[in-house]
Amino acid sequence: MQTIETPRVVIIGAGLAAVYTALKLAPLPVVMISPEQLGSGASSAWAQGGVAAAMARTDSPEAHADDTMRAGAGSVLREVAEFVTKAAPEHILDLSELGTGFDRTADGGFVQSREAAHSAARVVRVKGDQAGSEIMRALIEEVRRTPSVQVVEGAQAVGLESDGAQVTGVYLTSAQASGAQPMLLRGAAHVLATGGSCGLYAQTTNPARIRGQGIGMAARAGARIADAEFVQFHPTAIDVGEDPTPLATEALRGEGAVLIDGDGHRFMPDIHPDAELAPRDTVARAVYVQMQTGKRPALDTRHAIGAEIVTQFPSVTEACKRNGVDPVTDPIPVTASAHYHMGGVETDLAGRSSLTGLWVCGEAASTGLHGANRLASNGLLEALVFARSCARDIATQVSFENAPEVELSLVQGGNSVDVRDVTALREAMTEHVGVVRDEDGLRRALTEIAALEARHTDSDLFLNMTATATLIAAAALLREESRGAHYRSDFPDPIPGPGRRSALTLSEALALRDRIAKDTP
């Protein structure tokens, strides 16, 4: 196996967290590993709502932190919520200076929307529903101008070199040839910013590549995984048969759009006092129940937004129209789709994982900010705050400023992943580890994941996916309560008292899976 050593910081990923980390490390030299053209396959580029930040004089970071705590259903770490919300305004100003054209009022202030579970309008937007793509555009342009950043496109990480306590390198293959023979790249430090896991579900709003590979790599290397069971389902994915499902941003509901059933009845006021702006888990379950009872739910923007949806929310409009839906005259059919993984590699305030030499930020990390239910538009914010935290911590350990570019020669060949088995894995997750869960379904999920994994023991790519799927299902089975996005129909109530976070290693999850296999006839 080819081995290359570099004094550069190795950043695995190409989304917001990865790009922002690279910029905050400058002038320290870094090499970014991106499977596609920089930013093109990242969930952050698809984000519509915006970035939550207390920018208004009538708002405060303390109020933002309080909302984050409430939405997280008792599992948010207060220290983390305060750390993130206090830093939020400075990151908005930083993004503005880097060229992000946030929507502004006539007097130059930031246009802000109210989204679910926020007590104030504090979501900063770009062109209505294009925050993610516009932020990424500005940051990628800055990365291209930054001489300390080397970007390697067309390479994907498939594993971490680790002795179970320390990460010393990353195994890479060609992204164009599934199963290509790996090479080993050893850097001065390693940052995992690979995104979340929701592509493991058959119904998801995430890009195709976002299937838990990063979390799986870290877990297989021995990292501790926190809150794996908490997967957020977005209640207003557009139900038009596309994979991934297009998103109807929550900002639409912030502007007054309402959810109706097939008979035109508005159902959310009967379920929660905040109606359409209730926490996402509540709205997602309500939409799921409507789907299960055959009352195909829809988001009605006609009265609240009307024809202005075309200019205010162009991404939503385009997704609707290419599928024969005119949101100006028709309700938008919606469904609950896997959207964001609150769980991930457990990290501290500096972005350090339980493995020395490995920092994690973005959706691949579990920082304690989101708890059981992420507050709307806190995802991009978390990526920004912890990308900078990682960069600052790494800079205390790495002091060089000059390094030659890394020359990679990725060898083609190897065993490819059976697409049918990836599809089967995604279907098992949606059916058994979805919006509503129970013991029988979770045990079946673990059994099916084990059977699929047994057919791909020589595929790191597939093993990374099944590792993450196993952790999600095992953590969900162990949590015998309903809390936030984790809903157990056989344990419909939360355990009294303050919520608790979960933590698992892959070896612990596999041991549980093995016990279930032995008990299964």
Image (cartoon, rainbow, N blue to C red):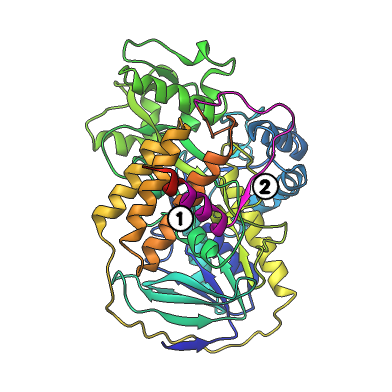
Classify mark 1: helix, strand or loop: loop
Q: Residues within 10 Å of mark 1 (few under 14, many from 20)?
A: many
Q: Residue at x 38, y 75 (%)?
A: 173
Residue 276 placed where, x, y %? 51, 21
Nearer to the camera, 159 or 80? 159
Q: Residue at x 63, y 74 (%)?
A: 166
Q: Amino acid at mark 2?
A: Gly
Residue holding disc 1: 212
Residue 79 placed where, x, y %? 77, 46
Q: Amino acid at mark 1?
A: Gly
Asked whether disc 2 touches disc 1, contact meaning CB atoms under 8 Å apart, the reply is: no
Answer with the quarter of the image where residue 320 lies.
Answer: top left
Left or right, 475 with respect to 301, comes to right
Q: Residues within 10 Å of mark 2 (few under 14, many from 20)?
A: many
Residue 150 seen in render: no
Nearer to the camera, 285 or 255? 285
Labels 2 and 1: the sequence-earlier one: 1
Residue holding disc 2: 368
Specify start and end residues of the magenta stretch as a single range.
489-515
Disc 2/disc 1 C-alpha distance (Å) = 18 Å
> Up-down: is 256 above or below 509?
above
